[in-house]
Image (cartoon, rainbow, N blue to C red):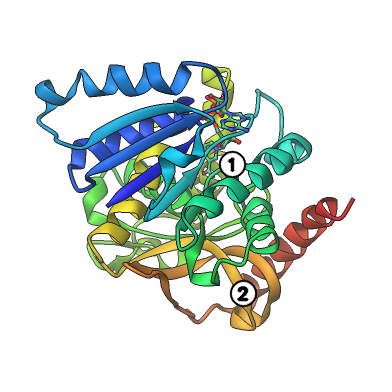
């Protein structure tokens, strides 16, 4: 399994590190536009190999996409992150140009690649990849819901004072502060609905803390987070590499599912060797359907900027 990670910044390097630590990929190519930066990150990471016990070869290149040829998976993290007080949507102008040029180069050398898009505003960037390439729709995966769901489980476990592994929950819809839809009704603690243990107010607080999870970290760190985003990407890459057929909420092109068309937004999907192997349609109640539809409409509004 050859994996390319474009953008050797905070998220790109974190994801390369987690992929290497799990030791399932033979090669990771880090690409950045900043001269020598990816080479430096790759060398530093490779010097952890004997200490951490992995055999994955990590190579860094400055803009030389010929080195990415034959990649099975490519992760796009190139672009600018938000600063405190910014929304993800404000990044669109800069990041759309970067993502478009990057994906064209990737596809030139790896025409059958599975692309995982991380750069924000992610749902719109995933839609842009559909428009800019001829890749099949199952080969374009937007990473947002995997991270947001991990943040949801963290907040649920905190509220329940429980081990995170005993808690389950999922966040769907747009990867934005206002658009995320943490499915509190379906969240469970040891298989029992969390509403049996938490008051409505406490659950509403969990949902709100989840939605502003990225903004909270951006305020604390001065830039956006990287450990959990890197771990979420590496989990998706591993699901493809190891054909796990595991369920993650991801931003995928909808063609009638969930009553939506021609938009990429977060829904539960099965990830395996072919990328998105199935879109799972869970039964939403009326309130959830209305929120999902509102969130999707907001993504469509952001997508309009791609035409301008
Ligand atoms: P960063 O600034 O640390 O790294 C970005 C890297 O991209 C830099 O090293 C930069 O030199 C490189 N770059 C810029 N233009 C390039 C080009 N044309 N070709 C190759 N490399 C290029 O930023 P960070 O924190 O790693 O975030 C990256 C992106 O990921 C941001 O847009 C951020 O908002 C997004 N993000 C998305 C998440 C999600 O859940 N979808 C979670 C966290 C971040």
Q: Is residue 179 left or right of residue 308?
A: left
| Dot 2 crowding, Cα within 10 Å, few <14, some 14–19, many 20+ | some
Report the residue at 39% width, 59% height from top: 169
**Percent position (x, y) of residue 75?**
46, 46
Left or right: 20 in relation to 257? left
Tell me the quarter of the picture where residue 132 sits.
bottom right
Mark 2 close to ligand 1, CB under 8 Å: no
Answer with the quarter of the image where residue 88 lies. Answer: top right
Task: From the viewer's side, name the closer residue of 237 and 248.
Answer: 237
Q: Residue furthest front?
A: 66
Residue 175 seen from this side? yes
Mark 1 vs ligand 1: CB below 8 Å? yes
Spatial CA span between label 1 and label 2:
20 Å
For the point 76% across and 58% down, the residue is 298
Question: Does 298 appear above or below 52?
Answer: below
Extreme right residue here? 308
Q: Position of residue 55 (x, y in %)?
A: 14, 35
Q: Is residue 193 left or right of residue 285?
A: left
Closer to the camera in the image, 304 or 57: 57
Where residue 65 appears, x then y in whole percent?
50, 39
Residue on which disc 1 sits: 119
185 in relation to 200, above or below: below
Helix, strand or loop at label 1? It is loop
Indicate the secondary structure of the residue bearing disc 2.
Answer: strand
Which residue appears at 78% of the width and 53% of the height?
302
Displayed-image quarter of ligand 1: top right
Residue wearing tag 2: 254
Whichever of labels 1 and 2 marks the residue nearer the N terminus, that label is 1
Vertical arrangement, residue 142 with respect to residue 297, above or below: above
Left or right: residue 92 versus residue 133 is right
Is residue 214 positioned above or below 296 on the image?
above
Q: Which mark is residue 18?
A: none
């Amino acid at each position: 399994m050859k994996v390319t990670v474009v953008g050797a910044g905070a998220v790109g390097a974190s994801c390369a590190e987690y992929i290497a630590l799990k030791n399932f990929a033979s090669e990771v190519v880090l690409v950045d536009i900043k001269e020598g930066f990816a080479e430096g990150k790759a060398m530093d990471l490779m010097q952890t190999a004997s200490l951490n016990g992995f055999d994955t070869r990590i190579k860094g290149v400055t803009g030389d996409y010929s080195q990415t040829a034959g990649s099975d998976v490519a992760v796009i993290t190139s672009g600018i992150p938000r600063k405190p007080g910014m929304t993800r949507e404000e990044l669109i102008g800069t990041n759309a140009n970067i993502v478009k040029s990057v994906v064209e180069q990737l596809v030139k050398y790896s025409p059958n690649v599975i692309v995982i898009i991380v750069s924000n505003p992610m749902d719109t960037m995933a839609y842009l990849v559909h428009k800019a390439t001829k890749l099949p729709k199952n080969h374009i995966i937007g990473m947002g819901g995997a991270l947001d769901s991990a943040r949801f489980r963290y907040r649920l476990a905190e509220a329940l004072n429980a081990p995170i592994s005993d808690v389950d929950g999922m966040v769907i819809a747009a990867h934005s502060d206002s658009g995320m839809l943490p499915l509190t009704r379906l969240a469970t603690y040891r298989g029992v609905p969390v509403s049996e243990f938490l008051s409505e107010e406490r659950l509403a607080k969990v949902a709100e803390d989840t939605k502003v999870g990225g903004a909270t970290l951006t305020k604390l760190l001065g830039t956006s987070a990287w450990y959990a985003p890197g771990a979420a990407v590496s989990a998706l890459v591993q699901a493809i590499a190891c054909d796990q057929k595991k369920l993650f909420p991801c931003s995928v092109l909808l063609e009638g599912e969930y009553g939506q068309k021609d938009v990429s937004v977060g829904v539960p999907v099965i990830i395996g060797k072919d990328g998105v192997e199935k879109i799972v349609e869970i039964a939403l109640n009326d309130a959830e359907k209305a929120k999902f539809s509102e969130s999707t409409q907001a993504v469509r509004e952001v997508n309009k900027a791609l035409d301008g």
